[in-house]
């Protein structure tokens, strides 16, 4: 039992951390839009996309995280930033229900309300019985937000980011090969209206 827990811990740490070199490069752009060094040597470019739906009357917004992959995936980390620490919005929750990763054995979402980030970590198998994520396209997470009612006109784009100590956007294949997917947040803006 102790050996299994140790193996799980090592795997979890491996997935939720990136290489030192990549972390150092990403850290330079920690507080702004991240220009990812796209890296995918497996067929078509994998793409992680975020799309926002908003209900301005209720001051609510939902961001859908969608993934296209053309190889089997064992794990992934998806760090998100939704403000600069002072943006008039907060993250309520993250759901994986009825998504492509709903069956994954480890589904984690760490919400940092101070820095306005969300770190999504996903591992398909911890027991040797759960299959990797098949190639395909579809939703992998739903992120729910509430806007402050006194928010002035403006907005914020949900972006990927680097989260200390070394978490960046990354996919991990069945054979433990890293992929840095393309990032698309063209439809990832949350808009604020003028306070009354």
Image (tube, rainbow, N blue to C red):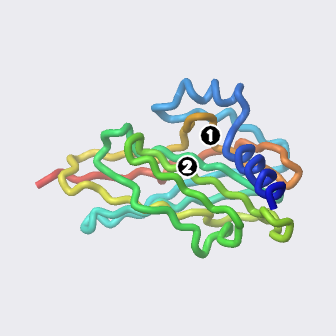
What is the x, y in percent for residue 30? 51, 31
Q: Are marks 1 and 2 in contact (CB under 8 Å)?
A: yes
Q: Image point 47% across, 52% down: which residue?
A: 111
Camera-side residue: 9 or 150?
Answer: 9
Asked whether residue 118 is in view, the answer is yes
Which residue is disc 1 drawn over? 167
Position of the C terminus by quadrant: bottom left
Residue sitting at the far left:
196
Task: Return the mark for residue 119.
Answer: 2
The image quarter in which residue 115 lies: top left
Q: As displayed, is residue 117 above or below residue 130?
A: above
- Left/right of residue 90 with respect to residue 100 in the rendered view: left
What is the x, y in percent for residue 74? 78, 57
Q: Residues within 10 Å of mark 2 (few under 14, many from 20)?
A: many
Q: Image point 58% across, 73% down: which residue?
A: 97
Q: Secondary structure at mark 1?
A: loop
- Left/right of residue 181 with respect to residue 80 in the rendered view: right
Mark closer to the chain start, 1 or 2:
2
Camera-side residue: 115 or 52?
Answer: 115
Residue sitting at the far right:
175
- Left/right of residue 50 with respect to residue 147 in the rendered view: right
């Amino acid at each position: 039992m102790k050996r299994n827990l140790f193996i799980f811990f090592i795997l979890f740490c491996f997935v939720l951390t990136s290489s030192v070199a990549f972390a150092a490069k990403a850290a330079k752009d920690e507080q702004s839009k991240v220009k990812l060094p796209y890296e995918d040597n497996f067929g078509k470019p994998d793409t992680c996309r975020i799309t926002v739906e908003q209900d301005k009357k209720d001051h609510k917004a939902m961001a859908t995280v969608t993934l296209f992959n053309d190889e089997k995936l064992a794990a992934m980390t998806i760090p998100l930033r939704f403000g600069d620490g002072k943006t008039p919005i907060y993250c309520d929750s993250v759901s994986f229900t009825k998504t492509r990763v709903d069956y994954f054995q480890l589904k984690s979402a760490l919400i940092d309300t101070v820095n306005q980030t969300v770190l999504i970590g996903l591992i398909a198998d911890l027991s040797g019985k759960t299959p990797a994520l098949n190639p395909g396209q579809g939703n992998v997470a739903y992120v729910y937000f509430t806007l402050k009612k006194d928010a002035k006109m403006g907005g914020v784009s949900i972006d990927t980011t680097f989260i200390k100590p070394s978490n960046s956007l990354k996919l991990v294949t069945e054979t433990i090969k890293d992929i840095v997917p393309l990032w698309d947040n063209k439809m990832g803006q949350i808009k604020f209206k003028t306070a009354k």
